[in-house]
Image (tube, grey):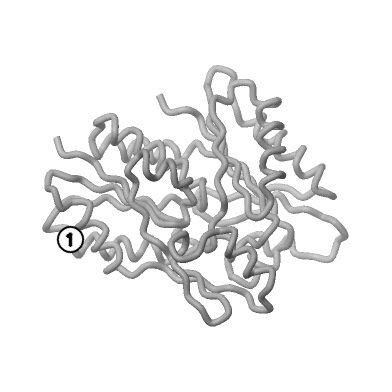
Amino acid sequence: MAKVQVITDSTADIPKDLVEKLGITLVPLKVHLEGQSYLDGVTIEPQEFYRKLAESEEMPTTSQPSPVDFVEAYREAAKDGETDIISIHLSSSFSGTYQSALLAQSMVEDEFKVTVIDSKTASYAIGMIVVEVAKAAQAGHSLDECVAVANRMIEEEQVYFLVDTLEYLQKGGRIGKASAMVGSLLNIKPILSIDREGVIFPIDKVRGKNKANTRIIELLKQNTVSDRSYRAGILYTDNREEAEKWAERLQENIPSLEETVFAEIGPVIGSHVGPGTVAVVLAPVQE
């Protein structure tokens, strides 16, 4: 049976130790700021990006990898032969990255097998899917079995996030249905999520961050069951201390929480959500 190699893009925001441990291949997107272009997570790291963002008067922009970038990654992954590839990417509603990967798939289809999956989500919500698939691949599961893990994760993940300002989502054109939430009401915090089509939408709105945090915990608890264990991802930008407080609250409120991973939101996703963003991803442990 062919081994399975897992490929994703840099917007999965997977901690570097997990990338190395699980042998995951990352194809970087680009971020453009103050006339400079950077490879996400390669030539610019999150902390440097948020520092530059704070000093800049311009909004950053981003761009997707080319099909050739993916072809190179696929051929490198398959160079030893007997390799199937599963390629999992940023929601097609946010970026053309998935389409680039599909084009690359068509360019190598006579050489080896590539399955491309639209995660319909972003940041470590993709990363959590990729990590579980990579664990299955390392355990010797087939391509079809790895695809099944990915599809279950996509269906079962919960994602909620808070942004300090909707300005970045608005100007980046990624706000989708959340545009209805934009208004001048003082201290109203929209709780945002990503629907099954990969589109950002407001799931609720409350006054103040503390109430928003409490409401997210309520939503998570409503959608968990007592006979399953869970894994969480806490996503943050320039606010690690806030992420650590979130982890404590989750541990207190989700007794069956088995693992929590801290994931720093990288420059590309950070360009669209802005500093001060925090997010929670929760998914059942895959059996």
Q: Residue at x 50, y 36 (%)?
A: 156
Q: Is residue 177 above or below residue 142?
A: below
Image spot of residue 128 (x, y percent): 47, 41
Q: Residue at x 59, y 70 (%)?
A: 172
Q: Residue furthest bottom?
A: 35
- The C terminus: image quadrant: top left
Q: Is residue 25 visible?
A: yes
- The N terminus: image quadrant: top left
Q: Residue furthest top?
A: 227
Task: Out of 63 and 17, give the one closest to the viewer.
Answer: 17
State left or right for residue 211 relative to residue 232.
right
Q: Quadrant of residue 5?
A: top left
State left or right for residue 31 relative to residue 252.
left
Q: Residue at x 64, y 78 (%)?
A: 58
Q: Is residue 287 above or below residue 247?
A: above
Number of numbered discs: 1
Image spot of residue 173 (x, y percent): 59, 70
Q: Is residue 117 visible?
A: no
Image spot of residue 81 (x, y percent): 12, 47
Q: For label 1, count other residues whose C-alpha is less than 10 Å away and answer few (under 14), some (14-19) or many (20+).
A: some
Query: Which element type, helix, strand or loop, lies under badge 1?
Result: helix
Task: Out of 222 and 249, give the one closest to the viewer.
Answer: 249
Task: Out of 168 and 263, give the one closest to the viewer.
Answer: 263
Image spot of residue 118 (x, y percent): 40, 53
Q: Is residue 79 above or below residue 222?
A: below
In the picture of the structure, the residue carrying the numbered disc 1 is: 108
Q: Quadrant of residue 261?
A: top right
Q: Residue furthest right?
A: 186
Q: Is residue 62 above or below residue 231?
A: below
For badge 1, the amino acid type reads Val
